[in-house]
Image: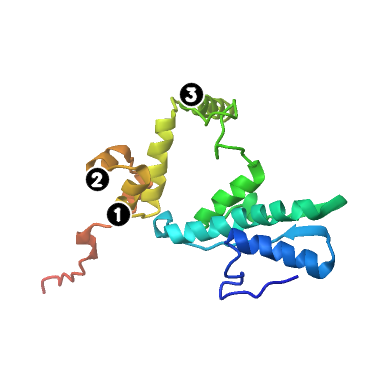
Amino acid sequence: MRANCGTDGFPPSLRDEAFCRKLVSEAVQRLGGLDIVVCNAGRQQARQSILDVTSEDFDATMKTNIYAPFWIIKAALPHLKPGACIIGTTSEQAYDPSPDLYDYLLRAWWKVARPQGWLFPGQNRVNPLTTRQLNRACHAAVQMAEIDKPVSLHTLRHSFATHLLEQKIDIRVIQVLLGHKKLDTTALYTRVALKALGEVTSPLERLITKVTPPA
C-alpha cells in the first residue's frame, strides 16, 4: 500500500502520528491483515555547514526517519501474528557517513547503536556518558596509536579548530562550533599549522613590477 507523496517524495502527513496510525489501519482493512511491515522511509539533505541546518530541517529529518517508523510499527504490532516480521532499512551512511549530512548522521548513529534513553549513554546506560569515561577512551586511543606526547580531550579541541582553519573555514564559524562567546577565546584555542603559514602569499608578491635596467 502506498500513500500519495508530496514534493519531497514523502506523504505530507507521514510526520504526523495520527496519519501513521491511519495508514496502518487502512492497510489492514484493504489487505485483510499484515504479514510484513517494511519501514523504508528516509530523509536526508546536504549542507555545507551545520550552521545551515535549520530547526525545521532537523525536525523533518527526525520525524521522517525515526518518529514515523516508530509510530507505524507501534500501530502495526497488534495486527502481526506469530511468524510475521518487521523490516527496518538503513544505508551506507550508517557506516561510511558523508560529512555534509549532519542531521542524517545523528539518525544513522541512532540506528546503528540503538541507544536507549541517552543518545550517548555511559557505562551504566541509565546515565549519560561522563567526562571521566571520555578521558579514559581518549587515553586508550592515544596508547593504541603509540603517541608519546601528552594528549587530552582539550587537545582534540585544538586539533579540531586547526583542521578547520587549514580547510579555510571562517574563524567566526569555528567560534560558533566551539561554543565561544568571544572571538578572542577562539583565537587562543586555535593552532595554525606550519603548512598553512607556508601557503600564505604576501600582498607584496602579488604586485607585478617591471624593472627596466639602465641603458
The reply to whether the C-beta atoms of the residues labelled 1 and 2 are less than 8 Å apart is: no
- Which quarter shows the N terminus? bottom right
Residue 205 or residue 7, whichever sits in front: 7
The reply to whether the C-beta atoms of the residues labelled 2 and 3 are less than 8 Å apart is: no
Q: Which residue is mark 2?
A: 183
Residue 43 or residue 56, whichever sits in front: 56
Q: Residue at x 58, y 75 (%)?
A: 6
Task: Give the quadrant of residue 208.
Answer: bottom left
Q: Position of residue 199 (x, y in %)?
A: 34, 53
Q: Position of residue 206 (x, y in %)?
A: 23, 65
Q: Residues within 10 Å of mark 1 (few under 14, many from 20)?
A: few
Q: Is residue 31 visible?
A: yes
Q: Residue at x 61, y 70 (%)?
A: 11
Amino acid type of disc 1? Val
Q: Residues within 10 Å of mark 2 (few under 14, many from 20)?
A: few
Specify whether 153 is left or right of 101: left
The disc placed on residue 132 is 3
Up-down: is 89 above or below 9? Answer: above
Secondary-structure class at tag 2: helix
Mark 1, mark 2: which one is toward the viewer? 2
Q: Residue at x 49, y 57 (%)?
A: 59
The disc placed on residue 200 is 1
- Ranked by sequence position, the earlier of labels 1 and 2 is 2
Secondary-structure class at tag 3: helix
Amino acid type of disc 3? Arg
Up-down: is 150 above or below 185? Answer: above
Up-down: is 188 above or below 74? Answer: above
